[in-house]
Amino acid sequence: MTLPAGSLPWLTDFGRWIARVPYAWQFRIRVHGRDRVPLSGGVVVVANHSSMADGPILFGVLPRRVTFLIKQEMFRGVAGHLLGRIGQIPVKRGQADRTALTSALSVLKAGGVIGVFPEGTRGEGDVANARNGAAWLAKTSGAVVLPVACRGTYQAEGWRPEVDVLIGEPFHLPEGKGRAALGVATEQVRDRLATLVAELDGLRVSEGRR
């Protein structure tokens, strides 16, 4: 199954509908490049992280079920239980969480999609502090990397603020083993995502939106 053990596919799809319709209604969301999402095979989605809204938005608008790596603090109470049931994986921040990475690797090898916010923390989403977990997952599993930029959720104000999601071209990371090769791959992931975010910023400015 392309979801982690213990997930309920029907509940995952219901959650995606909630994210795509009732939750997304509070924004005016435009998705660019949806046709670039590979419809089969392992995919590591890497996205910038501007606010708590980014995850639910991407969970709903991407055309495939996505398992996100989410900080373990979110997995508390009823909401935390539901996160696990809809296929999300808790991850410990600030350390190499082998349990989370192993679970994510299993999803990728089964042909599923893993979503990673490589900055690790929320902010303006400039991906300046990208970490190497996404690159490790892609290199180890052989999955393609899909960069996704999201803008408009950071300190969003007003009635239904405009949010843009720009999906980039999928790409494979270069071959090579060892820490140095992983560092090169991590930089490539960071550069591709940073370039995509800058492209989306330019698009929003050209259309009179920030």
Image: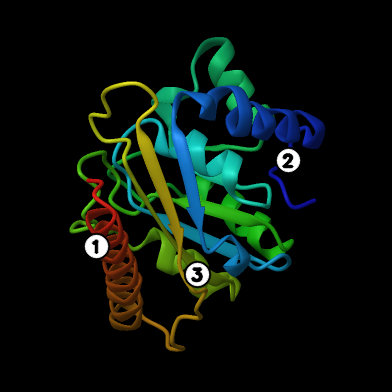
User: Residue 145 placed where, x, y %?
Assistant: 50, 69
At horizontal 67% and vertical 52% (from top left) the residue drawn is 63
Front residue of 183/177: it is 183
Left or right of 55 in this view: 65? right
User: Residue 81 placed where, x, y %?
Assistant: 61, 19
Name the kind of residue labelled 1 in the image: Gly
Residue 5: which disc? 2
Is mark 3 in CB contact (under 8 Å) with mark 2?
A: no
- Which type of secondary structure does the marked residue at label 1 adopt? helix
CA separation, marks 1 and 3? 23 Å
The picture quadrant where one finds residue 5 is top right
- Which type of secondary structure does the marked residue at label 2 adopt? loop
At horizontal 53% and vertical 26% (from top left) the residue drawn is 25
- Which type of secondary structure does the marked residue at label 3 adopt? strand
Between discs 3 and 2, the one toward the N terminus: 2
Task: Report the mark closest to the observer, 3 or 2.
Answer: 3
Residue under label 3: 145
Is mark 2 in CB contact (under 8 Å) with mark 1?
A: no
At horizontal 45% and vertical 35% (from top left) the residue drawn is 28
Task: Report the mark closest to the observer, 2 or 1.
Answer: 1
Residue under label 1: 202
Q: Is residue 90 visible?
A: no
